[in-house]
Amino acid sequence: MSIGRSSPIVSFGIAGFVPLLVSLFMALLMLLPIGSGVANEIMPNLVLISVFYWLSNRPLLMPYGACAVLGLFMDLWLDVPLGLNMLILVLTRLFVLNQLKHYRGRSRFVHWLVFALMSLAMYVLSWIVISGVETTLWPVRPLLLQWLVTAFSYAPVGFVLGRLRRTALR
Amino acid sequence: MHSIGLTPARFRERRGMRGREALWFYIALSVALLVLEFIGSSIPVQVRAYANDIAAPVLTVLERPVRAIQAGLERVAGVSDIYLENQSLRDENGRLREWREAALQLSRENERLRQMLKVPQREVPPAATARVIGVGGGAFERSILINAGSSDGLVRDLPVVDDRGIVGRTIQVGHLTTRVLLVTDLNSRVPVRLERSGELAIAEGQNENFLRLRFLPKGADVKVGDRVLTSGHGGIFPPDLPVGRVTYIDDEFVLLEPLGFLGKLDYVRVMSYVPVPDEDQSLMESPGGGHQ
């Protein structure tokens, strides 16, 4: 739907697929058994960071279709209710496109703060959705912990993505 | 980049409309998928099993350097303790030799008694030994992905153990991979009994690093440090597998620390367990048995 004749992704050539492929790679990284059993909890949501970063810097290279596909793969691989991450990532794009004009060109700290607040809202929405689908109140602590780790990871992961962006999308 | 005959303003307007259509399309799609999950359709389960197969080759490749780095770091961290650890292992080895002799003697005696009483064998053969190639769930679920699937003879609801105790059960079986729901997951329920007193209960996952003991009779004899074993009820886990150790007791909760080394799973064993059917049921199902 979003990748057509006039799609910016196509006009960038192979480099146009970098945000999507990097985010997909991030989804696979989230599956790796790194560290310990609490890796499930302490593993930051790398895909949310990646999608927010690319939307804030190259919004046309991360269309709704790409967000939906990434969300679907995350749902399948992480074994969470199908549609949950799809909804979260599509709403992330909606948020960024509407709010980018307020924080574009501002300092990295502002980007970090915006991401922390937005991701908190997304985690609250996830909690509501999963509690509704599973018809039980889901524990809040693991979600809160993962949000904290995700929010703090934005700076280092964003730094790496920035380097990659400058290399791949000059 | 722009289509012929479109002004930049018209181009932006058309793109905006397409964006809104796409937004509503994907929101509707995600809501439809969530509704499918809510009504308990089996389609997502099958799709997930095959999606795991797609990720498996990449995970297998990515997992190797991760394991190598972890092993290297552990080796470096462990060098300073190597002499103390060696001494401690020698002592433990001596104790284990004594236990082994006692266990062999008991095993022989047990076998003789079983033959005398015509009690069926309780050893459960392994269906597969598999490597953990992925974790799943994020903050929502406690599960792992192993590199054995239907091609290795695995099916749903088989018990999975490590060398210390039970780890979980198989829930999604793909061709090459299987997802194992850990005992710590919120959806996990394991029928158990206290080793010391024999009281029955259910060990419930909490999406935390501990389990909660539920449906324990009022006034049950339970102490911190008690071992908890599978009771064999429910038909998924064979009896007498170690589940956990009681770590906390108050008026409301009894909490267990899992004995399976869920923190650092590397290899796990999937058991080919088929519960012994009730005598009446086996008679009904046997040729010549049942309705006459």
Image (cartoon, helix red, strand yellow):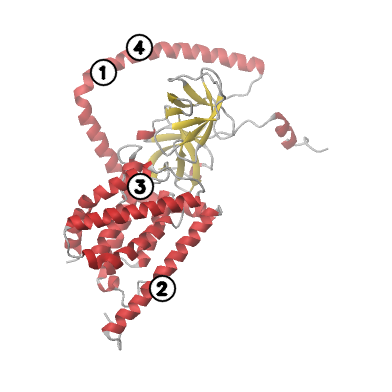
Task: Specify few, some or many for label 3: CA neighbours under 10 Å numbering under 14, 14-19, or 20 or more.
Answer: many
Q: Which residue is mark 1?
A: B86
Quadrant containing the N terminus of chain A in the rendered view: bottom left
Amino acid residing under circle 3: Leu
* Mark 1 vs mark 2, CA separation in Å: 67 Å
Callout 2: SS: helix
Query: Which residue is farthest bottom?
Result: B5
Disc tally is 4
Q: Earlier in the sequence, mark 2 or mark 4?
A: 2
Residue denoted by label 3? A31
- Label 2 CA crowd tier, 10 Å (few <14, some 14–19, many 20+): some
Q: Considering the numbered disc 3 on the image, is that residue within a helix, a strand or a loop?
A: helix
List the residue tagged with mark 4.
Answer: B94
Indicate the chain on which mark 1 is placed: B
CB contact under 8 Å: marks 2 and 4: no
Q: Residue at x 16, y 59 (%)?
A: A107
Query: Gap between marks 3 and 1, in whole Å?
Result: 35 Å
Q: Position of residue B257 (x, y in %)?
A: 41, 28
Name the amino acid, label 1. Answer: Asn
Q: Is residue A117 left or right of residue B25?
A: left
Quick check: B29 above or below B61?
A: below
Q: Chain of mark 3?
A: A
Query: Is circle 4 on the same chain as circle 3?
Result: no
